[in-house]
């Protein structure tokens, strides 16, 4: 289970996908995403996130097995809604599964899952995972109809896509922040646990972290990139500091 924290503090899930991206660029075993997960643990992360893509462009199947067996933090497995991924998740039984949209041609996840469109297919998919003990979240946009659909589907958690917010400036960013906050309030009112993630950095995390309904942030690309310059442990500790300051 995730480590318990006071209600005014956020959990931080560290995504280690892009350590695997660097490893795969040259083949071999270096840099090792398992080592990155262990450093994240020592630096104060509450969980590890890893996206097992259909094309295995970064995390590989054996990474999931090692993360489950060697890292003393709960694993949040991001995956598409496919039969192959369902089989893997039901066997691995990670602490959490986050269902995300996936297109082979995309560089990174471009938006939220369409829970409205796929409600019929998602409902039994989610139930199978939850019956095996995994906490299931849906990675969705901050649209009220998507939140209501997630609730009908039976997911216990939603993760609000913050990528659009992170790319905006000025008035447009403030308007998007309001939408995220309203979405978080709606989800909480429905009894859902609220997470957020995508594109978050030192510069933009504070306003998202200040939303009281959000209890977990999942951050990866920025932390791995920043670690090139200051080290992974320092990057995680600095992100934690900014999250704590925002809640204070």
Image (spheres, grey):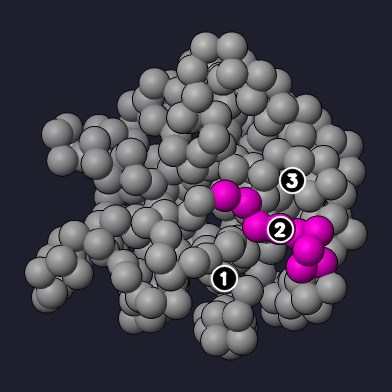
Q: Quick one: quadrant of the N terminus?
A: bottom right
Looking at the rendering, the stretch of residues picked out in magenta corresponds to 111-119
Asked if residue 31 can be seen in this view, the reply is: yes
Q: Residue at x 66, y 69 (%)?
A: 134
Chief secondary structure of the magenta span?
loop
Residue 114 tag number = 2
Residue 208 at x, y = what percent? 57, 26
Q: Residues within 10 Å of mark 3 (few under 14, many from 20)?
A: some
Nearest the camera: 244 or 179?
Answer: 179
Say if 25 sits above or below 7 in the image. Answer: below
What is the spatial separation of the Cα atoms under label 1 and label 3, in whole angstroms? 20 Å
Residue hosting label 1: 80
Whole-angstrom CA distance, mark 2 to mark 1, is: 12 Å
| Helix, strand or loop for disc 3 | strand
Left or right: where does residue 161 sit relative to residue 206? Answer: right
Above or below, comparing residue 206 to residue 83 in the picture: above
| Residue at 45% from the left image edge and 64% from the top image edge | 51
Q: Quadrant of residue 196?
A: top right
> Where residue 14 appears, x then y in whole percent?
41, 48
- The residue that label 3 is drawn on is 193
Residue for point 74% across, 34% down? 184
Which numbered disc, 1 or 3, marks the residue closer to the eye? 1
Q: On screen, 221 above or below 36?
A: above
Residue drawn at (48%, 54%), measured in percent from left and top? 109
Do the residues bearing badges 2 and 1 touch, measured as CB atoms within 8 Å?
no
Badge 1 density bin: few <14, some 14–19, many ≥20, Cα 10 Å: many
Left or right of 117 in this view: 215:
left
The x, y position of residue 90, in whole percent, is 61, 83
Q: Tell me the distance, in whole angstroms, between the alpha carbons under discs 3 and 2.
A: 19 Å
């Amino acid at each position: 289970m995730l480590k318990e924290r006071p209600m005014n503090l956020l959990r931080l899930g560290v995504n280690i996908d892009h350590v695997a991206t660097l490893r795969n660029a040259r083949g071999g075993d270096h840099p090792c995403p398992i080592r990155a997960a262990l450093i994240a643990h020592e630096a104060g992360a509450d969980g590890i996130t890893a996206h097992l893509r259909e094309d295995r462009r970064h995390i590989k199947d054996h990474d999931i097995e090692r993360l489950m067996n060697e890292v003393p933090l709960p694993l949040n497995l991001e995956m598409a809604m496919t039969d192959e991924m369902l089989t893997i998740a039901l066997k691995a039984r990670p602490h959490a599964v986050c269902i995300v949209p996936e297109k082979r041609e995309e560089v990174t996840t471009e938006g939220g899952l369409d829970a409205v469109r796929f409600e019929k297919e998602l409902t039994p998919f989610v139930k199978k995972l939850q019956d095996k003990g995994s906490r299931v979240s849906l990675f969705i946009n901050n649209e009220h109809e998507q939140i209501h659909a997630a609730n009908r589907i039976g997911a216990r958690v939603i993760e609000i896509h913050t990528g659009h917010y992170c790319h905006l400036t000025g008035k447009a960013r403030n308007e998007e922040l309001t939408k995220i906050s309203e979405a978080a309030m709606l989800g909480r009112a429905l009894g859902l646990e609220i997470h957020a993630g995508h594109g978050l950095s030192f510069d933009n995390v504070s306003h998202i972290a200040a939303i009281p309904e959000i209890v977990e942030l999942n951050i990866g690309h920025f932390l791995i990139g920043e670690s090139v310059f200051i080290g992974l442990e320092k990057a995680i500790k600095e992100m934690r500091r900014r999250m704590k300051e925002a809640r204070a």
